[in-house]
Image: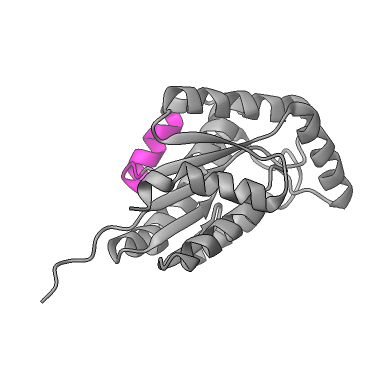
Amino acid sequence: MGGPAARGRFITLEGGEGVGKSTQARALAEALRARGHDVIETREPGGSPGAEAIRKLLLEGADDRWSARSEALLFAAARADHVERTIRPALERGAWVVCDRFLDSSLAYQGGAGGIGPNAIRRLHAIGSDGLLPDRTLLLTLPEVETMERLARRDAAGADRIGGKDAAFHRAVADAFARIAEAEPQRVRRVDALGTPGEVTRRLLAAIADLDR
């Protein structure tokens, strides 16, 4: 009889609005499947039935529907269900999990731009998700001028209530992500999001090459 399956890998994609996380999460998952891995694609908020229900509460409605504290609690509740029902079971059976946003988004948006601070966010994560961290976080980055242009195009198409916040908020988010990357260089790798989608996907694969052995 064979031994227990090796634990899978947990990869998250992070970054501000408009950097292409969703597109690249799908492309990365497909590239990993082509290498023979069992891959689960998921997202936050969402990724489980309970978390998807909370997603609607978080992303719909007026900009001021929730305070930063309320958002942090809702995100933590959604993440707890997501981790328990989707992420941990997949990792335990040996699958790779590719997730569009995770804890670092809460640290950047509610903890940083929202002013709550990282310690409060981490305490909520310790309670709700037992402190689970990704094996690798891929932080997609763009120059500010490119980010603002993409946000303007997204606003014209109709952004959700968080993506539609003002430029100062999004600058604060970018600053918070930069601080996270600086503090945790082993886990968080910055990846240039400029270029063709294929070029960016190749950079992502290079940033996790040490995990795919």
Quick check: is 128 in the magenta stretch? yes
Question: Is 187 in front, or is 153?
Answer: 187
Residue located at (73% from left, 29% from top): 143
Q: Is residue 152 left or right of residue 199?
A: right
Image coords of residue 95 (percent x, y): 36, 64
Residue 142 x %, y %: 69, 33
The colour scheme is: one colour
Asked whether the viewer can see residue 57, the reply is no
Residue 144 among those drawn in magenta: no
Q: Which residues are magenta?
A: 120-132
The image shows residue 81, relative to residue 104, as above or below, that is below
Question: On screen, 195 above or below 33?
Answer: above
The quadrant of the rendering that contains the N terminus is bottom left
| Left or right of 3 in this view: 102 | right
Q: Tell me the residue at 36%/58% (across/down).
A: 84
The residue located at (53%, 26%) in the rendering is 116
Task: Specify the farthest residue to the right.
Answer: 156
Question: Residue 27 appears at what percent x and percent y?
Answer: 60, 59
Provide residue 140's location: percent of width, then percent of height: 61, 39
Rendered image quadrant of residue 163: top right
User: On the rendered structure, is 119 left or right of 195?
Assistant: left
**Can you see residue 100?**
yes
Most foreground residue, 206 or 97: 206
Q: Residue furthest bottom?
A: 1
Left or right of 19 on screen, residue 95: left
Q: Main secondary structure of the magenta part?
A: helix
Single out the residue that lies furthest toward the left.
Answer: 1
